[in-house]
Image (cartoon, coloured by chain):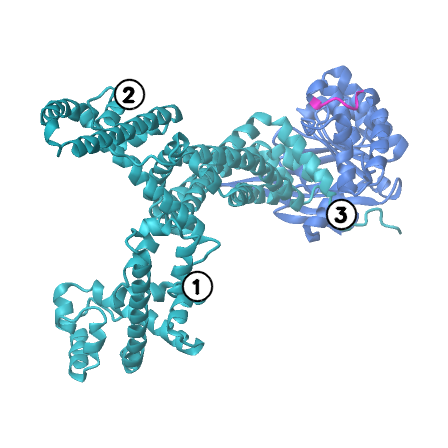
Chain colours: A blue, B cyan
Amino acid sequence: MAEHTDPQTDTGEGRVIIRTVGLKKSYVMKDVVTEALRGVDVEILTGEFISVMGPSGSGKSTFFNMIGALDSPTTGRVFIDEVDVAQLTAEELAYLRCHKIGYIFQSYNLIKYMTALENVTTPMAFGGVQPDAARERGMGLLDLVGLKDRWHHRPVEMSGGQQQRVAIARSLANNPSVLLCDEPTANLDLHTGQEILDILQRLNKEKGVTIICATHDHRMMDICDRLMWIRDGMIDRIARRDEVHVEVGGIGGMEE
Amino acid sequence: MKKEINVADQPWLGFSRIIQITVDGIRYRLFRASVTVAVIAVAVAFLMNILSESLIKRSVAQNTRDRIHRMRLIHNWSARLTSPGNPESLLDEFARSEVGSDMYREVAGMNGFDEAAMKEFHDHAGMAVSYLDFFNALDYAKRRNLIHTATGIGIFTRLMDKAAMKQFTEGMKNIRSVRFVSTYPELDAFLANWEGEQLKLKAVLDARVQAVAEIDAALAGRTIAEALADAEGAFGDTIRGAGFVFDAENIAGIIAEQAQSELDVTRIQESMDSYACKQAIARRENTLPADVNVVLMWQNVDSLRFAKEYLACMVEENEKAIAYQQKMKELDAAKPTEEATAATDKAEGKKDATEEKDKGTRLDVEGLTAERLATLAGARDEEASLIRAERLTVGAGEGFMGLGERLAWLLFVSLLVCGIGIANAMLMTVTERFTEIATLKCLGALDGFIMIMFVMESCFLGFVGGVIGAILGALIGLSRMLAAFGLNFAGAIPATDIILAIVASVVMGMLLAAFAAVLPSFKAARLAPMEAMRIE
């Protein structure tokens, strides 16, 4: 695992919050075995903003699900703050997902029949926050993403960008340590996508939230600390942003 | 180094919040929810309809039995007071009456049996009746083979003989198709006591003969109905004096009234002898007087207006008859005088002329009113409706839950179909909400919460559907039964039972819906979040 880890960050910003060891995942469909991940070892540090890039079908999303404790690996382990996810009970997993990890999806995944505020306060309710406190905090979070005056709107009454902003507010509901974003800007136009990126960057810088972002969006490169390329279920390359900038001419070729 | 992530167990979500989320979800998918509700409502309505109808039928059957028993009190008592009965009928009557009932006390009172003797006699009567039933159910060949030609209590007399007993037991061995109602040692023990019990039975019969003789003497030429009209007065005392247990408070009044009604009915029906009365009805019915019968008369008299007319007609007939008789008497008185022969001849001619038209019919109209006529006609209607109800409720209360086998089976199938329908609806709801389930799990929902959410949703739909269906079914059942039996039986509707049945049906609908939802929701709750999203 050491070969992929940048020694500089290891000693610098913080300690390891997510670590994977020999992560493999294969899907069996009838007789065909598809290997989505073929041994991934990676360490992610607290306070980092890391972009995971790669072509479609490279295993990017699978990797993302593994480290988010949303799916179980075929072999290998995922440690979240040195806790082996495979060892957790269903209740502990729920607690982990509720309190420690925030999820942002490409398709927003807001609950359709809840208002923006209810969407934001639902994870708080799951986490045992009292309704009044949850409401107050929910309004604060909506304010953070600039949607305070639209708290009573349902998802169908909002644009894609607004929905994604509600989703970000929701992911922050229980002050998570890690924010997992699965292509958060893919369904949005340039301007709205930029807004989302700005919010993510602000969160990372101001609140020190660890952000792991699977993306195709090249603008992400400007704001992240590290970039990780995945190809054919393997880590192709990990680089700090400043290193990438040096080779900026070659990026297009690498990205395909 | 302090760990940033301390994993603990996720707390449970508050119940009110679960309900709120569930209700919001239902409201968002109102159309689908209402279709599911409709499926449940139809099934529960079917269940409730059958349940309420069978409940009403059972209640009406009981009501009818009671009312018919009441209606026939006069007949039962007329028979009891005029005929002592035979040993078998006495045994039967006594064996089927409960300890402490009127009949039981009557037997004790007439014979002066003490409690122990009564108990023994009652037990033996019960056994004797069951044996007699057994023998009476046999076909002729078997019966002849087993007990030759003995009948009634003669069977016991015959079986007391050793040889006859042997013939019976040997015969039973050869008959495979019939099982003896009891055991042979029991029969032996019964027969050993029978001699004493038979003496008791004879004493009872003698006492009854004595009592009937007393009553007969007290009748003094009256018919039993005429005498019973006075059941509340002196005749009631006579009955009690003869040793019968005749309840002065409850029965006497009813019997007196029924006896009076019977007498009145006879008096009114005598009007059918009168051509003029027949004619009155024929006019109303637009038919020939010759076709008018008692039934037609009662049908018409049911209307108070016509009853008045008819009564007037009867009174007129009676007056005519009285006048005619008066005239006859006068003529008869005048007849013997010689000098009036010519006049008599003249009068005879006159008599012939008036005879047919003015003879009239002697009718006893004393005390009769038009209201009385209409009431008696109404009572006849009631009797007819009771008999119809008795016919319609044959077999009510039998079979599974009093439904009868075919209905129970239908009910089972309908519940099964409904269950599958709900399961299908829930499966679709769950499948269509995989993304939502996955999202909720990402947000920290427990598996239990997901399950409870769906089961509760299903329960809720089941409850609404159940309430709608139960009320609908009960109303349909109620109106159908009222249409079948008539308003006459409105009092026999078991309101408490029906409300209980409604509650039971609602619970049934909820349980059905909950059960149907368990499997899909279990499946949904167990999915890993990403698997669920991938399926979508």
Q: Amino acid at mark 1?
A: Ser
Real-space Cα separation, disc 1 to disc 2, in angstroms: 50 Å
User: Chain letter of disc 2?
Assistant: B
The boundaries of the magenta stretch are A150-155
Q: Amino acid at mark 3?
A: Pro
- Which chain does the residue under circle 1 lie in? B
State the CA–CA distance, disc 1 to disc 3: 66 Å
**Residue closer to the observer: B279 or A77:** B279
Q: Is residue B26 above or below residue B398?
A: above
In which quadrant of the rendered image does the C terminus of chain B lie? top right
Q: Residues within 10 Å of mark 3 (few under 14, many from 20)?
A: some
Q: Mark yes or no: residue A120 visible.
A: yes
Residue that numbered label 3 is attached to: B11
Task: Spot the residue most to the front.
Answer: B339
Dots 1, 2 in contact, CB < 8 A? no
The quadrant holding residue A173 is: top right
Labels 1 and 3 positioned on one and the same chain? yes
Q: Tag 3, which chain?
A: B
Marks 3 & 2 on one chain: yes
Horizontal side of A22 relative to B465 (left or right) equals: right
Closer to us: A255 or A180: A180
Residue holding disc 2: B284
Tell me what residue is drawn at x 84 percent, y 46 percent. Answer: B4
Determine the secondary structure under disc 3: loop
Residue A151 drawn in magenta? yes
Kindly tell me whether residue A61 is visible in this rendering.
no
Q: How many marks?
A: 3
Q: Which mark is on residue B101?
A: 1
Q: Amino acid at mark 2?
A: Arg
Q: Residue at x 21, y 64 (%)?
A: B136
Q: Position of residue A22 (x, y in %)?
A: 67, 47
Which element type, helix, strand or loop, lies under badge 2? Answer: helix
